[in-house]
Structure formats: structure tokens, C-alpha cells
Image (tube, rainbow, N blue to C red):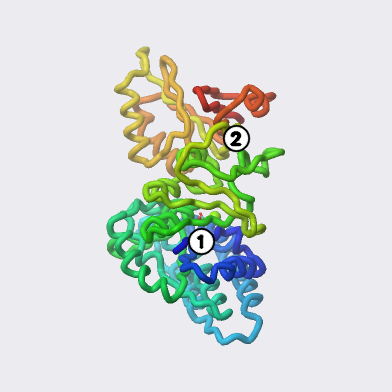
Amino acid sequence: MKVFKFGGASIKDANSIRNMTDIVAEYPDDALVIVVSAIGKTTNKLEQIFFKKLKDEDFSSDLDELTEYHSIIIQDLFKEPIDIDLKPVNELFTDLKSILASNVKNRNGAQLYDTIVSFGELLSSTIIGLYMQGNGMKINWVDARSLIKTDPTYREGKIDWEITESLIKETLTEKLSESNFITQGFIGSTKDGHTTTLGREGSDFTAAIFGASLDAESVTIWKDVPGILNADPKRFEKTQLYSNLSYQEAAEMTYYGASVIHPKTIKPLANKNISLLVRSFKSPSMKGTEISKGDIHDLPPTYVVKDKQCLVSFGVKDLTFINEKNLSIIFHILDKLNIKINMMQNSAVSLTVCIDYREDKVNKLLQTLENDFKILYNQDLQLITIKNYTQEAVNRVSANRDILVEQRTRHTYQIVVK
Ligand code: ASP
Ligand code: MG
């Protein structure tokens, strides 16, 4: 069996959904689990709605836009008089609206976030499943929340692998000989059935969870780029396509912020030696990039740019130096708040970390540590990493930049810039 994952851009309108359906139809002999993200930028919209709901602001125009966006796609896809009952889609909209109409004053914000944003994937998978069935394809819809079990860390659910793997195996293995399955990326649920999400852009990870649990032949991520490139073509000219990459190399690229695949995707597949293919839904006949075991040498420099970065410096308050005790206090809190350090540097009197800017987390961090340290921070920064750097590559990214931090190791060059 194989796992196919289609992200938001590959299903952003009716034509894109027809295109992804055509791709699936090219694999009649394979048992497929198809993992889909929310349509287009639906998750962003749902996030906005959630934040407005939380602040008791009017979100009705956002909700109308979201409904309208899906309705246009539905009308286009189902315009032929096919014998399909759209009740499941309508029910989802009714559920979403009733949650948004309810009183949420005393509810856990992060839990409510997961409940609301999960509708993006529930809608896309339902619409696409019905469309495929309407076109005579043998496909069943399965609720990922009944298979992917997480702890109650809302917005970043941690997978309970043992239960998840056995649920997926038990539920799907045999049935896959009769039909394909479509399911949602990004979502899961706790043991008591509360919806959780796996972190933004988590649908790739979902595909890997299904792939690893079912011992898939391969997992394919269908993207709007030809495969993995040595830089983001939206930011750099003359990019190069990798036809093969090792798990290790690809994992490191995602660690530095290469957004082409979610960082958690590689490990579960590498553990089971399952190839991860990154291919273009625009040119489905091209082979794309295969990520698998092995060493691939002499790679060109890889450029990774991470936006929305924030530099936080923790300075000692008295005339002492920063020591291991201070460091352990800071690291402990970062770990507790689930904040990942993208880069760090220390001086005699301070530690500076570069982290993703998320308002709620940064505020918590400052609140927790402001008694112990003098804290300064800058936001709206970029972290630029070059793996396998050359001097020429360094010049390319650092010329005429306002550099706040610069670091070089044997293979990796990093700067934080305005
Ligand atoms: N729809 C979710 C998001 O936009 C998950 C994903 O696309 O992978 O973050
Ligand atoms: Mg996406």
C-alpha cells in the first residue's frame, strides 16, 4: 500500500481537486490511504475566527467567506446531476456554526482552537471523498480522530504511538484490499475523544504516521514544487532539484526551517526504512525527490530561510556571569513552554536564543523569567541557514544585511537578520 498526501495548495479550488483526483486515478493497482489538508488557506481563516471568538469580536464576515469559499468549490464539483447526498458536508457546517454560537467563556482556549480548526480537514476530506465516490472511485472516508491518539497537549498533540499504530492497523489493513481510504491530516484526538491537532502544517506528519503504521511501500507528498530544491524558488534564483536525499540530510533541512516537509515526518519513516517521495502535483509524471536511507555526498549549498523569528536575550541582573545554573533555569522553562530554540549564543553576561515568534508563548516566557533575568527581545527577524556552505554562498546571503547574530560550524552557516 501507499500513502498520498495532498496539501492545501493542491486542493485549493475545484480544478485542483479534479487534478488530484486524476493523479489518484493513475494508481488503480495500489491500495491508497489519501491524507488531505484543509482546502487552500482554510486553516488560517479558522484561526482568525477562533481568535475573534475568544476575544468576543465579530467573526461573521470571516465565517461567511469560509462558507462561500467552500460552497463555490462544491457547486463547481457537483454541478453535474450526480447521485450524491451532500448531507455530511452540511452537517459539518451546522456543527461548526453551533460551536461558534456557544458560550466559550470558561473553556480551555487551546482545546477550543483544536476543535474549531479541525473543521478545515473534516470539510476537505468529506467533500473530496464524496466527489471521488461520485466519480465511481472506490474510496471510504475515515475519521483520523478515531485512529490517531494523542495526549491532551492541545495545538501540539503528542502521538501515543502504540495505540495509534494498532488502531490504524486493525481498522485499515484488511479493508484496504477492497477500497482506498481518504482521511484528514493534522488532527487526532485524546483518549477521551477530544479533538487535538498536531501543530500547524502537521498533515505531512499524519501521512508518515499512516505510512509507518501500515508499513507502506512509500509515502508521497504532492507539492507545488518539483521536489526538494536547494532553496525556496520564491526567494532564490537558480535553484537545484535533489533527486535523492538521505533521511539525515532531509531531517536537518527541516530542522532549520525548510518548509517543504514538516520536521516530524522523516523519523517514523526512517525507522521503518520507508521512502518518502516529494513530487509535483503540477507535473505528476516527474519523479521528484526520493528521501531514503544512505549517504549522498557532494551536495550543493542548501539555503533555508525562516521568517517570524524573535531573538530573546536573558541577561544576569547582578555583576555575575551567566553560568550553568542560569542556563538550566532558562532551558527548563523553554522546555516547559514547548518552545524550540532555532539557534543560540552566549556571552559573559547573557544567553540569546532565536525562536519562532508566537505571541502567547513569548509573553509567557517573559512573565516567567523576568524576575530572574534582564530580558530584551527583537521580533520580525529572519533566520537564514546555509547547509554545506561555501564562501560564495555566504556572500550571497550576508551582503548588505543588518546581521544581529552570526554563527559558523563545519557544515552550517547561520545568521539572524532584520
Ligand atoms: N491545514 C493545516 C495547516 O494549514 C495542516 C496542514 O496543512 O498540514 O496548518
Ligand atoms: Mg498546508
**Mark closer to the chain start, 2 or 1:** 1
Q: Are marks 2 and 1 in contact (CB under 8 Å)?
A: no
Residue 90 coordinates in the image, percent (x, y): 51, 78
What type is the residue that disc 2 sits on? Answer: Tyr
Query: Residue furthest toward the right?
Result: 237
Q: Is residue 86 left or right of residue 402?
A: left
What type is the residue that disc 1 sits on? Answer: Phe
Residue 26 coordinates in the image, percent (x, y): 59, 68
Q: Quadrant of ligand 2?
A: bottom right
Residue 45 coordinates in the image, percent (x, y): 56, 59
Foreground tag (2 vs 1)? 1
Q: Which mark is residue 303?
A: 2
Residue 49 visible in image: no
Q: State the separation of the CA atoms marked 2 and 1.
A: 27 Å
Residue 80 coordinates in the image, percent (x, y): 65, 83
Relative to 69, residue 395 above or below: above
- For label 2, the crowd category at 10 Å Cα-Cα, with few meaning under 14, some 14 to 19 and many 20 or more, is many
Residue drawn 34% across and 53% down?
Answer: 159
Q: Quadrant of the N terminus?
A: bottom left
Q: Quadrant of the C terminus?
A: top right
- For label 1, the crowd category at 10 Å Cα-Cα, with few meaning under 14, some 14 to 19 and many 20 or more, is many
Relative to 227, residue 53 above or below: below
Residue 263 visible in image: yes
Q: Which residue is mark 1?
A: 4
The residue nearer to you, when weighing 130 against 86, is 130
Mark 1 C-beta to ligand 1 under 8 Å: no
- Report helix, strand or loop for mark 2: strand
- Report helix, strand or loop for mark 1: strand
Residue drawn 45% across and 27% down?
Answer: 344
Q: Which mark is residue 217?
A: none
Q: Is residue 127 left or right of residue 346?
A: right
